Image (spheres, rainbow, N blue to C red):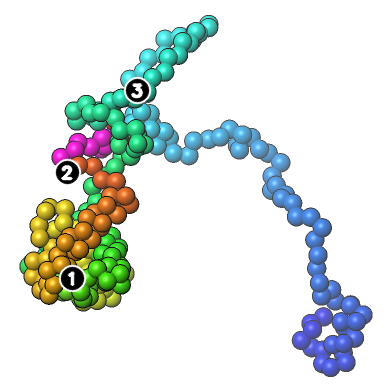
Amino acid sequence: MDLKTFQGDQLVKVLTQSPIPTIKGWNRLEGRPRTDDFDQTLRAEVRDPLWMLTRQWQLGEFLGNDAGSPAFAKVKVATTRLDRYQVKDGAPQAYDETMPLEAHVERERLPLEGQPVGTQRIPTHLSLSLQIGRHWLRLLDKARTAGQLSRDYKQDFKDIYPVELPPRDAQSSDIYAHQEVWQIFAATAGRSMDGSSLYRTIRDGNDILEGITVDNHDDVPVIRDIAQQLVQWFRRLYNEPELNEASAWAPSYLEYQFTC
């Protein structure tokens, strides 16, 4: 029977006498195998033998030599604290125990240099650049609220370090090829600040106040102090190696190589 064919008192009769079950319940849900033969499952077949071979090559197992099996083994263990480490192409250096070994070995420099497109320099990592810019504006706003600055300098820095929409040419084709990427550029261009350019200026020791009119000379040391606060915040958040520090990454083995 179909409930849609009932009208008025007929529907009431159907619900009260329950000739058609309206509620279903289960006491227990359990899986039911579709076969009685589990031989194929228990064999644990390798679906991608080439992957297994490449893993063996990566870990150097092809260089091993299994000549026999030991009847017994004795182990003597001595421990010591790490005091030096060396990446594959670098010089030995003192080990800083305040930083995990993984951070020493695997850290990489962030893309802050930007991509030159004509006369512009487009942020390579736009979300990172926007994050730095937003924090810088918050620091300026905090100093202004505390009465440390004579006026609001946020718009000045937005004008000096703007986020610009890349021109539609071959150099920026990688940006316009992805709709979400250029939409973010379009949404932030002219409204947000390129924090990567500001951070590079501070990091390289250049004057961040170049091109900005300072009405009160007492604002200069305050802004320079805020610049150091930005650098400290960035280094707490991101752990970068030094500019000339060797990398432990070995592309041919797809692994990090280092010695302790």
Nearer the viewer's eye, disc 1 or disc 2? 1
Q: Please, is residue 23 above or below residue 135 in the view?
A: below
Nearer the viewer's eye, disc 1 or disc 3? 1
- Left/right placement of residue 141 relative to residue 50 reads left
Q: Residue furthest right?
A: 17
Which residue appears at 15% of the width and 67% of the height?
218
For the residue marked with disc 3, what is the amino acid?
Phe
| Mark number, residue 62 | 3
For the residue marked with disc 2, what is the amino acid?
Leu
For the residue marked with disc 1, what is the amino acid?
Phe
Q: Please, is residue 182 above or below residue 111 in the view?
A: below
Nearer the viewer's eye, disc 2 or disc 3? 2
- Which quadrant is the C terminus positioned in? top left
Residue 70 x/y as whole percent: 49, 8
| Mark number, residue 157 | 1
Label 1: how many residues lie within 10 Å, few (<14), some (14-19) or many (20+)?
many
Residues at marks 2 and 3, CA–CA distance in whole angstroms: 36 Å
The kind of secondary structure element at disc 2 is: loop
Label 3: how many residues lie within 10 Å, few (<14), some (14-19) or many (20+)?
few
